[in-house]
Amino acid sequence: MEQENEIIAEVMKNGPLLIHGNITVKDKEGNESKRENVTAFCRCGVSKNKPYCDGAHYNINFKG
Ligand code: FES
């Protein structure tokens, strides 16, 4: 049984890392932003909106 407020990381086949739950993301300058519900982080390296997935992994046929 899932705990309330549990954060789950899910690796999508050939796609992003999904974080299920409400999180705070701190960028390299230390700025924080709140993300709710599901956040997709890029694993392929080609997103133009890093660290988030922008769907570009489809265009490069990312495998991983
Ligand atoms: S994983 Fe989606 S753009 Fe990189």
Image: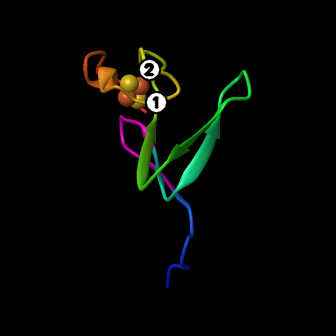
- Outermost residue on the left side: it is 59
Q: Which mark is residue 52?
A: 1
| Left or right: 26 in relation to 40 | right
Mark 1 neighbour class, 10 Å CA radius: few under 14, some 14 to 19, many 20 or more: some
Residue 22 vertical position relative to residue 54 in the rendered view, above or below: below
Which SS class for mark 1?
A: loop
Q: Which mark is residue 49?
A: 2
Q: Residue 52: x percent and y percent?
A: 46, 30
Q: 58 left or right of 10?
A: left
Q: Say above or below: 1 vs 6.
A: below
Q: Residue 10: within the magenta?
A: yes
Q: Which residues are magenta?
A: 9-17
Quadrant in the rendering for residue 39: top left
Which residue type does callout 2 highlight? Answer: Asn
Q: Residue at x 42, y 37 (%)?
A: 16
Whether 40 is among the magenta residues is no
Q: Nearer the viewer, residue 28 or 56?
A: 28
Instruction: Say whether marks 2 and 1 touch (CB < 8 Å).
Output: yes
In the foreground, 1 or 30: 30
Q: As drawn, which residue projects farthest toward the bottom?
A: 1
Q: Which residue is farthest right?
A: 30
What is the CA distance from the residue labelled 2 to the residue labelled 1? Answer: 6 Å
Q: Quadrant of residue 56?
A: top left
